[in-house]
Image (cartoon, rainbow, N blue to C red):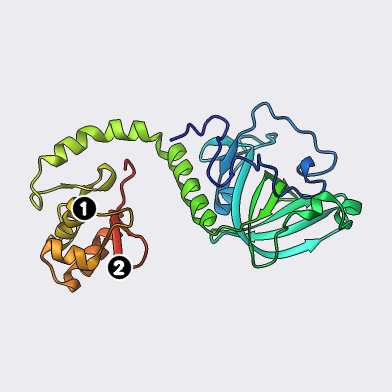
Amino acid sequence: MNDYSNNYSTTSYGAQGGAQGGGFMPGSQTGDSPNAKRSYGKDTLRPVTIKQLLDAHHPHPDAEYFMVDGSEATQVTFVGQVRNISTQTTNVTYKLDDGTGIIEVKVWIDADAFNDEADPSNQKPKPAEQGYARVWGRLKAFNNKRHVGANIIRPIQDFNEIQYHLLEATAVHLHFSRGPVEQLQQSNGGAQSNGAQNGAYGGGMQQGGGGKQLPANTSMAARKVFQAIKTTEQGNEGLHIQHIATAAGLDINEVVKGGGELMDMGMIFTTVDESTWALLEIDG
């Protein structure tokens, strides 16, 4: 995993900030206003959700930047569905919703260039209402209301990018809130070794996903479902409940009940559909 405490690196969907040049809006290079002063010395780029932006805080009253997960966040990138577009003389305001919250995104424009169809900047695709867009910019606050001053906003054409971004934002959030993957692997190593010595369904505690332990009061059905998912060969999608039932020697109703118990404990999650499950393991 990349060290996200340093400058953000290139990713498959260009979350590094549009280095390939797509998606610039007229006059958008100025960030939050035509007269804004920029300092790039400590800039980093963080993939985030809108909820993280709404929950972010200033480390002190005079700070120009926000803290996300206890770490300084200057430049951010996120995706969302465009709920509304409002065009003003000096800016275009987009209202984006990513399922975790709603925030306004302002793109400052040169009115003459924006209205000139022959201007090169108008030859690139622009976000449309009810479509999806990716944003790069800075979180701002004005009159106690937050918005993002966008450097770049472009429409999303490959919808895999939406899921990719949410997974990436989750990975970075876990990196800052729980520590690097390597650190988790080291701290969980001893617990996993001890867990491997336990019987398949025995005793007080059984090793769970990501170094967690199954509680002593876990039902036998849940233990069998967990062990079946853990030991049965499978692809990235996990196992269908029919295969789990066969591997665990249970009927479907028992599998569903045991699986629900494991989901409530955060041990497994659904993948391609509600009937396909996989272990939730941080350390992979």
Q: Is residue 114 visible?
A: yes
Disc 2 designates what residue? Answer: 275
Which residue is the extreme one toward the top?
41
Under mark 1, the amino acid is Glu
The span from disc 1 to disc 2 (Cα, nearest Å) is 17 Å
Q: Residue at x 74, y 54 (%)?
A: 124
Q: Is residue 218 visible?
A: no
Q: Residue at x 16, y 48 (%)?
A: 206
| Quarter of the rendering occupied by the C terminus | top left
| Quarter of the rendering occupied by the N terminus | top left
Residue 96: quarter of image: bottom right
Disc 1 designates what residue? Answer: 233
Mark 2 falls on what kind of element?
Answer: loop
Give the answer, above or below, for where 45 lies relative to 206: above
x and y, in percent, of residue 205 in the image:
15, 47
Q: Residue at x 66, y 41 (%)?
A: 20
Residue 236 relative to residue 254: left or right: right
Taking depth in this image into account, of 282 and 131 the one nearest to the observer is: 131
Give the answer, above or below, for where 76 lies relative to 123: above
x and y, in percent, of residue 17 in the image:
64, 41
Taking depth in this image into account, of 5 and 26 the one nearest to the observer is: 26
x and y, in percent, of residue 64 in the image:
70, 36
Under mark 2, the amino acid is Ser
Residue 111 relative to residue 134: left or right: right
Residue 233 relative to residue 30: left or right: left
Mark 1 falls on what kind of element?
Answer: loop
Front disc: 1 or 2: 1
x and y, in percent, of residue 245 in the image:
16, 66
Residue 241: quarter of image: bottom left
Q: Residue at x 88, y 51 (%)?
A: 113
